[in-house]
Amino acid sequence: MNNSAIEVIGYDKCTGCYGCLNNCPVKGAIEFNKTEEGFYKPFLTEKCIQCGMCKKGCPVIKKVNSNLEENLEVYSCWSKDEEIVKNSSSGGIFSELAKEYLANGDIVFGAKWQDGEIVHCGISKLEELKELQKSKYLQSKVETSYLEVKKHLNAGKRVLFVGTPCQIAALNTIVNHENLVTVDLICHGIPSYSAYEKYIRENFNLNIKNVTVDFRNKDTGWENYNLTFKNKDQIIIKNNHRKDLWFRGFLTDTYLNKPCYNCEFRTLPRFSDITLGDFWGVPVEVKNSAGTSVVTINSKKGKELFVKISSNLEVKDVKWETALKGNPCLYNYKMDSSRREGFYKDFSDLSFEDLQKKHFPFPNKYIFFIRRVLSFVKTRVLRVIRGA
């Protein structure tokens, strides 16, 4: 008898990456269902034959990473195409990578909205790219995407797969092919669907199936972005990211998936060929105020692809330490989970607004103002020093 992957690692360590499902030889033996806390996790059915194959698809158990730290390169980048930057969360690097594949009839996998939730899918046409653009701060349902990647590769297609670090690590356990390039994102952690559903229901009186969110609307700037909630194509409300109640809970790490607090995939070397993210804290001399991406090249395959698209980019060399300072989730970052237990204990009894006031209140506005002033003064002083 073989224990299953979930029996070996337990739900507290399960990231919900879908690796076990994609490596299971028996259709229907594993089902992914939403837990009470609001995360999709694997559950065994009576069809399970206890073969143990799911363990070979679980990146918590089987880590596959052939990258070397010596191949690491770090850049501050943005697309030269202003329209791409405008329609992207940061500097538009994902879109430039995707264009290189789609222009040649190849396949790009990423995350899109479907019935109010996030799903992974593959696209082959440039006009489909818009669905995969922009950050989506909810768990993506991968379903059988890793197997679909394998099918495309076996059919002679090149594949670009974009996902979270744990999703890329899971894909690595199932697919190893020279024509697969993986891109992971600097991931802050996966927030709860249950918290999101409660927030949508109580604030807008809507089912999440009717709602999509632009989590990174840049109408007011890349660094001062809004969350734009829509019912179909109609805007419900725009909330500044510093004032939105749900986003406050996300940023304060109140209702993330348990393994996110001490993620095993924030490593060096990274598991992907290329890593992308917003370049928070980017030095002014290598910054595009409309959106700047931090890019780490983690492998030779990643380097080859980056060189192919570099003529479409503004590229600035930066040091690893500079990127890490404003983006700690790049490497070995541990989060404080102290709010989480109390939040879920009160979840059923309190409204979302009362949960927010109790477990992740906004800072005192006067203290917040003073901190903003001090930050502004510090920035101005540093600019003077650098210019001296």
Image (cartoon, rainbow, N blue to C red):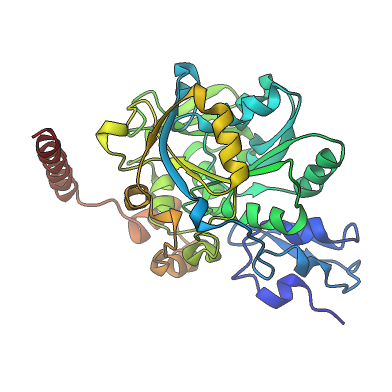
Among all residues in the image, which is located at the extreme bottom?
1
State the residue at coordinates (29%, 51%).
Answer: 362
Q: Is residue 87 visible?
A: no
Q: Position of residue 163 (x, y in %)?
A: 61, 46
State the residue at coordinates (46%, 52%).
Answer: 188
Give the quarter of the image for residue 182: top right
Give the quarter of the image for residue 174: bottom right
- In the image: residue 108, left or right of residue 358: right
Name the foreground residue: 57 vs 258. 57
Name the foreground residue: 21 vs 227. 21
- In the image: residue 15, left or right of residue 28: left
The count of marks equals 0
Q: Position of residue 156 (x, y in %)?
A: 84, 35
- In the image: residue 119, left or right of residue 357: right
State the residue at coordinates (88%, 69%).
Answer: 48
State the residue at coordinates (48%, 18%).
Answer: 81
Q: Is residue 35 visible?
A: yes
Q: Position of residue 146 (x, y in %)?
A: 76, 49
Look at the image and tell me in which quarter the N terminus lies: bottom right
Give the quarter of the image for residue 154: top right
Look at the image and tell me in which quarter the C terminus lies: top left
Vertical arrangement, residue 122 with respect to residue 378, above or below: above
Vertical arrangement, residue 12 with respect to residue 16, above or below: below
Vertical arrangement, residue 181 with respect to residue 316, above or below: below
Q: Position of residue 83 (x, y in %)?
A: 48, 17
